[in-house]
Image: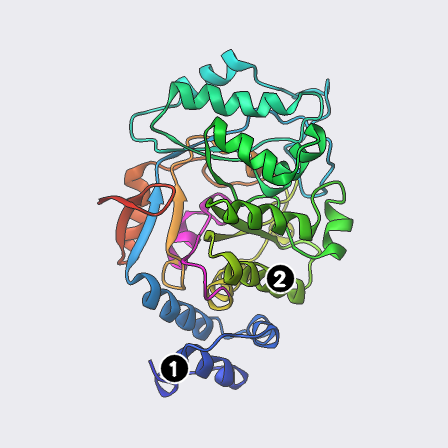
Amino acid sequence: MALDTLVLQDKNLSTVANKVIAGERLTLEDGLTLFNSNDLLTIGQLANLVNQRKNGDNVYFIQNLYINPTNVCEAHCKFCGFRRDLGEDGAYTMNTEELLHYVETRYHEGIREFHIVGGHNQHVPFDYYLDNIRTLKKAYPHVTMKAYTGAEIEFFSRISGLSIREVLEELRKAGVESLTGGGAEILTERYRMKMSPEKASTDMYLEVHRTAHQMGMKTHSTMLYGSIETLEERVIHMLRLRELQDETNGFLVFIPLAVQPIKATAGIKRRNSAIDDLKTMAISRLMLDNFPHIKAYFINIGTQLTQLSLTMGMSDVHGTLIEERISHSAGALTQQALTVDELVWLIKGAGKRALERDTFYNVVKEH
């Protein structure tokens, strides 16, 4: 692609476009130029160019099951509708039998990954979280345990008295093979002090993933956008992850997550716009030049926008999930799960190759 093949509606994008075409790294100022532009088509074309260079027409998905063993949580994040206090109506903490029953009634042979996250339940010991993994790994030894967020790891360190590395070592011995991407929210302290002051700091979140990468683990990372953060903070968030990826090369994928209103009855003005969703995903692809994949999360943005995003730099549509709870407890109106056929339909409908993968992006099957 050359600059003269692009029809720039916003001439301010010419410098950024030239850098992208030349394969040069974008700066904080470049990220802000992109966010402040209304030329979504050009931004999308540039993101598509970057993704084509990395992944061609390949789009990935996985057959996975979401498991949330407890919703009791010491933190009171302002964006969360999932958490409960101990004894509050709707609060739960699964015991071994309940955990196994939950999985057994939803499991099928195609599932290759358990995605396990939950509340920071200070009323149970660290051994509870280890036992959940041991129990599932014993019952389903062939399924990859992608478990716990960076914020949960920091919480486990506090309640156990163990270092971050020691916590990760214990989890890995129990069967954890990869960390989920949650708990990142926005990686600036201004945001975290307002929205999630009881959870891991920016530096601690990054240190958890740095340590995991140093131990040979591959992990994921997210960004929860659309609330009080500034556009500059979104770009700073990406740059901090990019710096860590330069150092460790341990991230597999970045997942931009549109924040959900607390109530499902919230009007459209309380929800993120389609333009901002597409722009944020595309800019993520442009800024995170060292990440293999950027994921479109249909739980937060819906299936149609997910399909459209495959022409704007996205190379992953996540998975089957079976039953998503956290976003839907906060007012998401999307499907809680999709079948393999539906995911393949979305991907092929965008003119892409549908590749079923494992947790580590090894191709299992082309559909």
Q: Amino acid at mark 2?
A: Arg
Locate residue 35: give its quadrant.
bottom right
Q: Amino acid at mark 1?
A: Leu
Q: Quadrant of the N terminus?
A: bottom left
Residue at the spot of label 1:
6
Using the image, determine if residue 309 lies above or below residue 69. below
Q: Is residue 320 magenta?
A: no
Q: Residue furthest bottom?
A: 4
Residue 234 badge: 2
Q: Nearer the viewer, mark 1 or mark 2?
A: 2
**Residue 223: where, in percent of width, then height?**
58, 53
| 84 or 301: nearer the viewer | 84
Contact? badges 1 and 2 (CB < 8 Å): no
Magenta stretch, residue numbers: 288-309
- Residue at 49% across, 26% down: 174
How far apart in space, not on screen, are marks 1 and 2 (Cα)? 26 Å
